[in-house]
Amino acid sequence: MSAARPQGWQRLLLALGLQVGVATLWLSLLAQTSWALQSPLAVWLLAHGLVTAGLSHWWTREVWWSVFHVVVPWLVVLALQWQLPLYIYPLLAALLLLVFSPVLRDRVPFFLSSDQVGQALLDWMDHQASRRFIDLGCATGGLLVRLAKARPQLEFVGVETAFGPWLVAWLRAWRQPNLRVLRQNLWQTDLGPYDVVYCFLSPDPMARLADQFAAQAKPGACLVSNSFQVPGRVADQTLKISDWRDSVLWVYRAPLLKPPGLHQP
Ligand SMILES: C[S@@+](CC[C@H](N)C(=O)[O-])C[C@H]1O[C@@H](n2cnc3c(N)ncnc32)[C@H](O)[C@@H]1O
């Protein structure tokens, strides 16, 4: 089943298809039956949400899309009641895409490392011979700005593909001489020059990223992954962080160790 699950933009199309398809079903029921008109609107919204969320869960197994389907009919009715101007809808869609497009492409959501993670990275780097640090998917650059201010003698780079977060990070880096923010895909980024490669992504890209790190990183460089482990590899160090989500930093040093009994590609 998992091989057939929709990927990337297919998930957005599926969500739109489900919303429009199931709404069309209800409308044809309304047109053909007399009892349908007697049910309160709330019942229809609930039924629509549950049916679309159920179908979405069956197809994608992704909780967030199910939540989307339950919530969206209520939002549509609210928007209709408020009689928002028509341009609001494409504007909202464009804003969401500016921030969340990587979620669709790489299955990497938008959330930020905590301040405690930033402090732990600073403490950890003080015991490493690290000079160059890169954040793969730096979002709005909060972590990088904090690190770059605290360690002006080190060099920091962030790459980000989503336009909105990249623009914010780029503006924040403007006055920080030891920080550069590039609008660049992490898969097109050469990891060779860096001593610390930091990421906070999702489980999905970790195996591919580990291969990229293994191929490009110089000996002794570290891949530090917030929360998500590299499948099939043993972390050289684990840093447990006392923040609201009990983050864990998994540290892998190049060359990557292979776990006993597993073949490395
Ligand atoms: C969970 S956020 C982490 C933000 C930041 N690194 C931090 O720790 O606070 C992941 C970020 O990675 C970005 N991203 C996802 N795929 C990417 C890719 N292929 N190349 C560059 N950035 C990507 C997303 O847009 C998102 O801003």
Image (tube, rainbow, N blue to C red):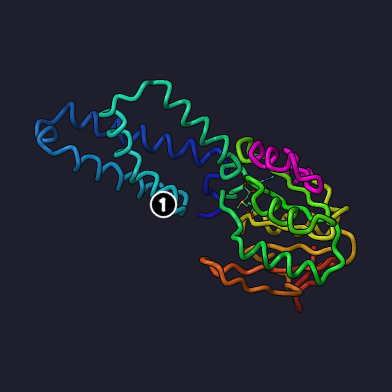
Asked if one can make out residue 245 in the rendered structure from this viewpoint, the answer is yes
Classify 10 Å Cα crowding around label 1: few (below 14), some (14-19), many (20 and above): few
Q: Is residue 52 above or below residue 262?
A: above
Q: Residue furthest right?
A: 219
Horizontal arrangement in the rendering, residue 172 relative to residue 216 (left or right): left
Q: Residue furthest top?
A: 86
Image vertical order of residue 99 relative to residue 150, above or below: above
Q: Give the position of the C terminus as an image quadrant.
A: bottom right
Residue at image point 42% right, 34% down = 17
Find residue 182 and report its horizontal and vertical position in percent: 75, 40
Q: Is residue 129 magenta?
A: no
Image spot of residue 73 (x, y percent): 31, 38
Q: In this rendering, does residue 215 appear at all?
A: no
Q: Position of residue 259 (x, y in %)?
A: 75, 75
Residue 31 higher or lower than 134, as above or below:
above
> Which is more toward the observer, 253 or 123?
123
Position of 146 compared to 68: left or right?
right
Asked which quadrant contains residue 252, the reply is bottom right
Q: Which residues are magenta?
A: 166-188
Front-most of residues 64 and 54: 64
The answer to which of 48 and 125 lies nearer the viewer is 125
SS at badge 1: helix
Q: Residue at x 85, y 56 (%)?
A: 153
The residue that label 1 is drawn on is 58
Tell me residue 126's x, y (percent): 80, 69
Q: Nearer the viewer, residue 257 or 81?
A: 81
Residue beneath the point at 53% across and 45% down? 6
At label 1, the amino acid type is: Trp
